[in-house]
Image (cartoon, rainbow, N blue to C red):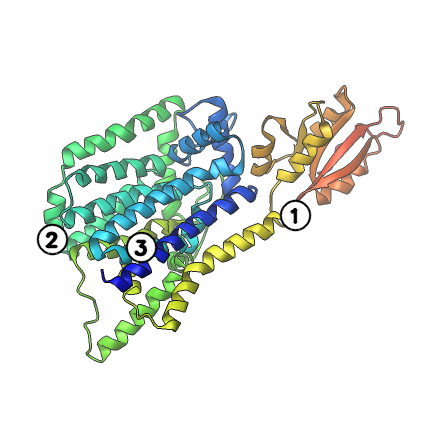
Amino acid sequence: MNQRASAYANPLLLLLLAIIGSRLLTMAILPFSGTTEPRYAVIARIMAETGDWITPWYDNGTPFWGKPPLSFWLQALSIRLFGIDEFSARLPAWLVTLGIVLLIHALGKRLYGREAALWSTLVFSSMALTYVAAGAVMTDVFLTLGSTLAFVSIAMLSLGARSFWRWLFFIGLAVGLLAKGPLVLVLTGGTLMIWLAWSAGAGRVLGALPWVRGTLVTAAVSLPWYLMAEWRTPGFLDYFILGEHLLRFIDPGWQGDLYGSAHDQPYGTIWWYWLLASFPWGFAVIALAARRTVAAHRGAVPLLPQWSDGEKLLVSSAILPGLFFTLSGNILWTYQLPAMPALALLLGLPLSEMPMRKAACKLRKMSILVVPVVVTLGGSWASFHPLQLRTEKYLVQAYRSARGTSGAPLHYIRKAPFSARYYGADAIRILNSTEALTQLKETDRSVGYFAVRRPELELLQAQSAVRCEPIANSKRHVLLECHYRPGDSSSGSERELLF
């Protein structure tokens, strides 16, 4: 690499460290909100508290069959080490993302050189989905670690790397199986099939893999948990293999989901998700493709670049999730995350070769910074405006302060949000409307704490046997401190709370 490129690479490394490090801020200051993050955080917390490392639990009586346990293992371990807060639950995803960045750099450096490798890591780290997932309690980033390790291992072998990469391929499959299940076999197998049909050298590389011994390694790492999970909670394999990995994708309106609802999207939506997930770099791909098409039309270059075997593998990996999920309606944008490492590697070289003109440099810097800056500023603003978030963190804190040492539980009517369950843990009780008033009447303290939705507030206050005072609120709930008045002759104590 020439002196000019060497001088430019150091700022790139500093910029990469700044982007990766900036995610730590929002990981620490943003409370859990919505559904996905707090749901998985609750499962990890239960695992950390119970020490049950075999069965993830949706609640204390319901096993969670939707995902394998790798992410929950690491999150529960982090909670045990660093305490029950948002940062500790999110930290494993950040560390795993860092591992993916290192894999991208290793392959990019061998393919294109140090500067292009740094550009690839910058592209990956600043993509919308990557940046969000790097600091979130989700399972997709752990799957992406497995799938990335698998295709990077094959690519390194195609470039003449040491033989230990043959074994890392099978370790990658095991990681994926423990992170999200057989989907990693589909993604990796589909990628290799495309590559085998396209690349003349693919057969030689794949033929050199120790398939029998390697498969035994994958099975030895991943299969014991599957067998123990079925033994502990019979029915797991049927639901997880058939339901989560077949019916979910071929039936857009699948009603068998035990833990949520189906996402019925039009066919082809996965490509819109690709654009969102890769933002802003997907637009760079479109621009580069358009420029090459124009040049090819003029006869200046062939339409398709003269890709090496390794680059053909990257293209195969980058397009496989889109191809596989094109005819599936039950999808999320996170399904494109396994495609992002290969896409970032493909962009590294053209970005490193762009002219050093002022306009080009400015455009690249803006593209790198747009997602980290927007997410960091948006997250910081949201942390100071918690009522804009669907979180129960501050309501639960107000409840704990109000109850003091009394030990009075916090009652939710019919259903408690996952964030309330994470922050409140054993203090949370879920009651129906009749049980709520009965619980208040029978308590020795004659005081109870209820989190009710705003439309339900007036109905509760209308009960003449109950005096309730709002003491805090979240976006969806009002925290009430309620006192029972047993001497009121018009108490209406037999009336049911109508909410």
Q: Which mark is residue 212?
A: none
Front residue of this view, candidates 30 and 337? 30
Question: Residue at 50% of width from left, 54% of height from top?
Answer: 375
379 left or right of 116? right
Where does the N terminus fall, quadrant-wise?
Answer: bottom left
Quick check: marks 3 and 1 in contact, CB under 8 Å? no
Is residue 330 visible in the rendered image? The answer is: no
Q: Position of residue 17 (x, y in %)?
A: 40, 50
Is residue 192 visible in the rendered image? The answer is: yes
Q: Which residue is mark 3?
A: 118
452 left or right of 86? right
Q: Residue furthest top?
A: 444
* 363 w.r.t. 233: above or below: below
The crowding category of the residue bearing disc 2, from other C-alpha atoms within 10 Å (few below 14, some 14 to 19, many at least 20), is some
Q: Amino acid at mark 2?
A: Gly
Q: Which residue is mark 2?
A: 201
Q: Amino acid at mark 1?
A: Leu
Secondary structure under tag 3 reads helix
* 213 w.r.t. 109: above or below: above
In primary-sequence order, the first of circles 3 and 1 is 3
In primary-sequence order, the first of circles 2 and 1 is 2
Secondary structure under tag 1 reads helix
Q: Separation of disc 2 and disc 1 at Cα?
A: 57 Å
Secondary structure under tag 2 reads loop
Residue 213 position by quadrant:
top left
Q: Amino acid at mark 3?
A: Leu
Which numbered mark, 3 or 1, is in the foreground of this view?
3
Where does the C terminus fall, quadrant-wise?
Answer: top right
Q: Which residue is mark 1?
A: 387
Front residue of this view, candidates 47 and 438? 47
Q: Position of residue 50 (x, y in %)?
A: 48, 22
